[in-house]
Image (tube, grey):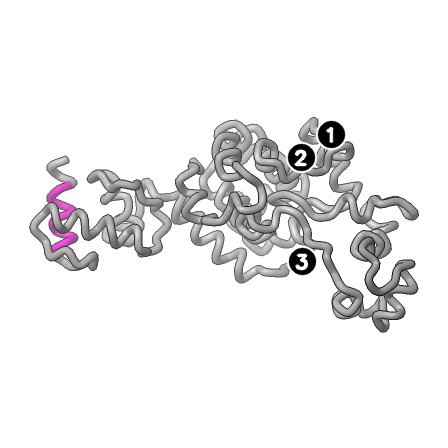
Amino acid sequence: MLTENMLQALWPHGDSKVAGLIAGIAAAAPTIFPKYGLNSDLVIAHAMAQFSHECGAGTEMTENIRYTAERACVVWPSRFSSPADCYRKVGSFAGDPNFPVKLIDNVYGNRMGNRPGTHDGSTFIGRGLSQVTGRDGYTKLGARTGLDLIGNPDLASAAGTALECGVADFVLCGCLPFAERDDIGGVTLHLNGGHIGLAERTAWLGRWKTALGSENPPAHSTAWLQVSLNKLGADPELVPDGSFGPMTAAAMRHFQANHGVNADGKVSPESIAAIETALKAA
């Protein structure tokens, strides 16, 4: 099961935009995952891999709409031929502090259920773990969760409700059957509408599979080492993510120093033998 310790290790800046996000996700996990049918570490790993990419591991919980007119021409070249053309079409001007809102209302208006002539476009921007977008998306997600996401769209990214919104959206998008089949391409296509960022999503999936499936890691693997050091009293406890970082090296040095092995933090045959001996005696 997903833990706060795992999130802190894999999302080291996860609370940087939403205070208490990591604790909120960890607290909700035991209830929310089974509520929406995510009943295995494999499926949870797929969901968390997608969320890790979509929200930048907690650092991009709300879509950044602070575009310049120049940048808008690059992002939407079929809409705007020049900054001047952009300002004209969105009803703005250079230096207008409301330009970002006018731009997004123009670009996202009359799409995804957003109503033309309103601020739906800039109100229902991407938010949360799955980056739900558009009035239709918020409406469907609100109906599924029972949350008033139309009246309060920030609930999609709030610490106490982010996980439920993300998981419910994952299911609404049709990702669950593909996650159960371990089909990262199918999961990505249904959540993203394409395969943008597939390589990064795949890398995240590997990290989450390792962390969540750490009960029986391959013998003498890094995850095995981390699990073993935890059993032998590593403090702070390590997240068995399969990555040999500074905390794992420090725990190894501490173990070595207390078991008559050269305390260099390296995984030597002598160190492996000492760990196996200590595990048998534990």
Predominant secondary structure, magenta span: helix
Residue that numbered label 2 is attached to: 155
Q: Is residue 118 above or below residue 198?
A: above
Residue 170 lies in what quarter of the image? top right
Q: Mark 3 is on which residue type?
A: Gly
Instruction: From the top left corner, tell me how far across and down residue 61 is, in percent.
Output: 62, 46
Residue 69 lies in what quarter of the image? bottom right
Mark sitting earlier along the chain (1/3): 1
Q: Which residue: 78% across, 44% down? A: 123
Instruction: From the top left corner, tell me how far across and down residue 1 is, in percent.
Output: 43, 35
Q: Mark 1 is on which residue type?
A: Asp
Q: Are marks 2 and 1 in contact (CB under 8 Å)?
A: yes
Under circle 2, the secondary element is helix
Residue that numbered label 1 is attached to: 148
Q: Mark 2 is on which residue type?
A: Leu
Q: CA distance from mark 1 to mark 3?
A: 28 Å
Q: CA distance from mark 2 to mark 1?
A: 8 Å
Magenta segment, which residues?
Answer: 270-278
115 horizontally vs 180: left or right:
right
Residue 65 lies in what quarter of the image? bottom right
Foreground pick, 112 / 94: 94
Q: Residues within 10 Å of mark 2 (few under 14, many from 20)?
A: many
Foreground pick, 110 / 18: 18
Residue that numbered label 3 is attached to: 194
Q: Which residue: 41% across, 42% down? A: 6
Of the two numbered discs 1 and 3 in the rendering, the one whose residue sits closer to the viewer? 1
Q: Residue furthest left?
A: 260
27 horizontally vs 159: left or right:
left
Instruction: From the top left corner, tell me how far across and down residue 186 is, in percent.
Output: 60, 52
